[in-house]
Image: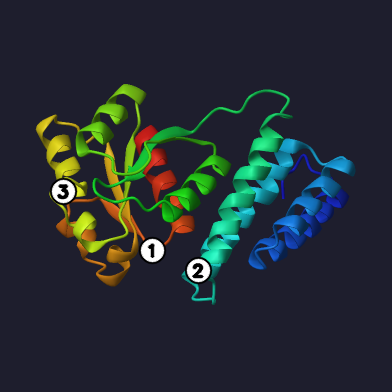
Amino acid sequence: MDPLTPPGAARMLDDILKAYTEAIYNADRTTALAVVDAARASGVSPEDIVFKVVIPGLDMMIKAINDGFDTNLAQHFMTAHIAADVTDRMLAQFAKPPEMVGHVIIGTAAGDLHTLGKRIVMGCLKAQMIDAIDLGVNVPAERFVDEAVARGASVIAVSAMMVHTARGENGAIKVRQLLRERQLEGRIRLVVGGAPFRYDPRLYQIVGADAWADNGVSAARVILDFIKEARS
């Protein structure tokens, strides 16, 4: 418990977190937002909603995934979508703008036009106070690296939903090659994700990535860990 949080307020936050988490497990956006609105009406600060409700809610979803609970893509998508929506609303009400913990460049590999996995990652990153620059779809390897350098990003995240784009010479493989050629490997980490990496957990090593994530929710935690490592 936060030593500055009175016991009664802590119990109320626990109840709010429980109700919010139940709503996101049920992919129930309406109820999740109603929980947040009721919390604000009862005097809970926007900072507490983000840092003591939304982010712990993400952590609980990650734990459920890692523990093998039966979660599905709809739950992952709604968790990220709700987290991004609530965070946007609360940030506008913060007493002072929060400090971004880091920057990440994200996009879908060259030749790939899929967006769902990337959108899930983006929503979770926003709630973690990570500045995520979305380059869109069909992104050339050179642009990933150029933007990472220009924005001071410590992570490049490449999404691919098809085997030929995951393994393609213009995807993560070329991003790794460019990082090596420009002597950026110690400064910028490469993370990949998408269906082909779930089918072959060794594929991320084959394409030269530093890590991969099994789903969009967990990807945000992998990226956050690399950003914290870079900052330390």
Looking at the image, which residue is at 49% across and 52% down?
A: 120
Secondary element under disc 2, as helix, strand or loop, is helix
Estimate the x, y position of residue 96 in percent, counting from the top left: 68, 23
Q: Give the mark nearest the N terminus, 3 or 1.
A: 3
In the displayed structure, would residue 198 be above or below residue 177? below
Query: CB of mark 1 within 8 Å of CB of mark 2?
Result: yes
Residue at x 74%, y 43% (from the top left corner): 3
Q: Is residue 5 visible?
A: yes
Residue 26 placement, left or right of 227: right
Question: Which label lies toward us, 3 or 2?
Answer: 3
Residue position for label 1 = 214
Q: Residue at x 54, y 37 (%)?
A: 129
> Which residue is pictured at 70% across the width and 29% down the height?
92
Q: CA gap, disc 1 to disc 2?
A: 9 Å
Q: Please give the label number shown on residue 65.
A: 2
Name the N-terminal-most of marks 3 and 2. Answer: 2
Q: Horizontal and vertical percent for residue 122?
A: 48, 45
Q: Earlier in the sequence, mark 1 or mark 2?
A: 2
Q: Position of residue 24 (x, y in %)?
A: 66, 61
Mark 3 sits on what residue? 173
